[in-house]
Amino acid sequence: MYDGKFSIPTALIIASLFLASFSVLAQNKINERLLASSEENQEKYFTETLQKYGMECGSVSRAFYQGSGDDELAFWSVACTNGENYSFQISKETEKPFIITCNVPALLFGFECFEKIEDMN
């Protein structure tokens, strides 16, 4: 007869499964898809996103992954065919990225566009 209690090994297994499932849910899915995509698909995503939010670009000619922090906030830089450059912050929390022109990140975050961020953690 089941007494409603778990043995310690069973409780540890259940806790591990719970934590593993939480970890999967916490990942930045948009960034993972971008990293797994071809350059062409990355450029297409960024072009469509800029157009969706009314930002001038023409089309994206270069996408550069800068890095991610502990909070799964991913930073990308993009160059446009019209000469504009943008910085994208892609969060696991929302589908809409935070987009700013490339002259702003150095002021806000202490790094430039198209610069690899070595240690953000």
Image: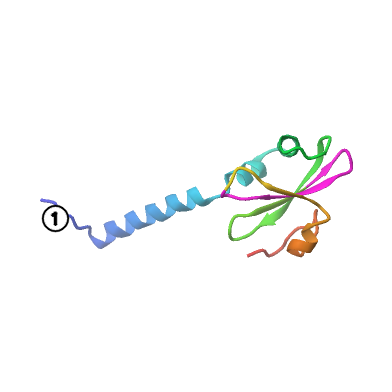
- 1 above or below 46? below
Question: 81 and 32: which one is in front?
Answer: 81
Q: Is residue 57 left or right of residue 52?
A: right
**Helix, strand or loop for disc 1:** loop
Q: Residue at x 66, y 46 (%)?
A: 97
What residue does disc 1 label? 3
Q: Which residues are magenta?
A: 78-93
x, y percent for residue 67 = 69, 56
- 15 above or below 95? below
Q: Residue at x 43, y 49 (%)?
A: 21
In what quadrant of the picture does the C terminus appear?
bottom right
x, y percent for residue 27 = 54, 50
Question: 114 and 58: which one is in front?
Answer: 58
x, y percent for residue 71 = 58, 58
Q: Is residue 27 left or right of residue 41?
A: left
Q: Quadrant of residue 79?
A: top right
At label 1, the amino acid type is Asp
Residue 86 part of the magenta segment: yes
x, y percent for residue 73 = 63, 54
Q: From where the camera sits, is residue 111 visible?
A: no
Q: From where the camera sits, is residue 77 visible?
A: yes
